[in-house]
Amino acid sequence: MKIAATIFAIILILGCSTVTAKDSAGLVSGNLTTADAVGAGIGYIGAFVGFGDNAAGIFGSFTYGLAEYTDIRIKLGFADADVENSDPEIFLGADFKYEIMDYYDTLHNNPFDLAAGAFMEYVAYENTPVFQLGGNLIGSIPYRFNSGHKIVPYARLNVRMERISNDLTDNSDTDFQGGFNIGTKFELNQDFHLYGEFQLDGNAGIFLGLDVRMF
């Protein structure tokens, strides 16, 4: 647990030092997940929207548990840049996470869930496609009500490579950027979850959505 806390502190410093970097396109699909893995062989589909100061997006997702503490997710949708006369463009995202600390692990008495992972996102903006690749840490802690409902506050820090291409000049600009997300998952039951999230990076904004268990 000391190693995990040290890694979290390092990413926090790096993320806070880059989160206000200028000229960042920012992520259009947010985070919208907790540190808790979905479980081996379990699958969810989701529907989400994002409203940022650089772009708005609408997308679907599919999450699958590869193992008890590891899951992967694919995201596909459309993003509309905050540029005059721009049209919505397709984007693709993918991520995976490994749960380092499990809140429900009674043997180690962990104070919260903690996961590490990696992600990518590609947006085919007209003339200026954006590709991003990075790593992140996600922390969350569940609170269960007497009704059986559960609320799970979470936060994510990410550090990423952001490559913005210019098809008109055949040039590209690659920088390291950082971002921070904070949100809440509300579990109505084991099969239906709602999300609300704030994002602070080049595309600062609000993200909302839900996911439903399929199997």
Image: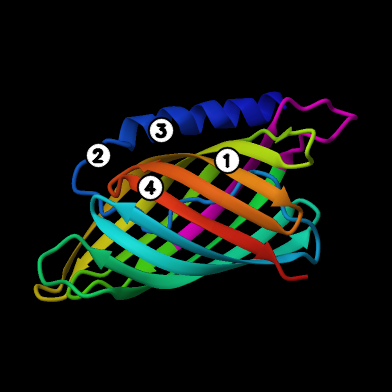
Q: Regarding mark 4 in the picture, which secondary structure is present there?
A: strand
Q: CA distance from mark 2 to mark 1?
A: 21 Å
Counting other residues with Cα less than 10 Å from the Cα at mark 2, is it few (<14), some (14-19), or many (20 or more)?
A: some
Q: Which label's residue is closer to the chain start, 4 or 3? A: 3
Q: CA distance from mark 3 to mark 2?
A: 12 Å
Q: Which residue is mark 1?
A: 138
The quarter holding residue 34 reads top right
Residue at 32% x, 36% y is 18
Counting other residues with Cα less than 10 Å from the Cα at mark 1, is it few (<14), some (14-19), or many (20 or more)?
A: many
Q: CA distance from mark 4 to mark 3?
A: 23 Å
Q: In this image, 149 relative to 32: left or right?
A: right
50 and 104: which is toward the camera: 50
- Asked whether the beta carbons under mark 3 and mark 1 sit within 8 Å of each other, the answer is no
Q: Which label's residue is closer to the chain start, 2 or 4? A: 2
**Which labelled disc corresponds to residue 14?**
3
Q: Locate residue 200, reporting x and y percent.
A: 35, 40
Q: Locate residue 89, reporting x and y percent.
A: 29, 75
Q: In this image, 10 relative to 141: left or right?
A: left
Q: Which residue is mark 2?
A: 21
Q: Regarding mark 1 in the picture, which secondary structure is present there?
A: strand
Residue at 32% x, 67% y is 79
Quarter holding the C terminus? bottom right
Q: In this image, 173 relative to 182: left or right?
A: left
42 and 19: which is toward the camera: 42
What residue range appears in magenta? 100-120
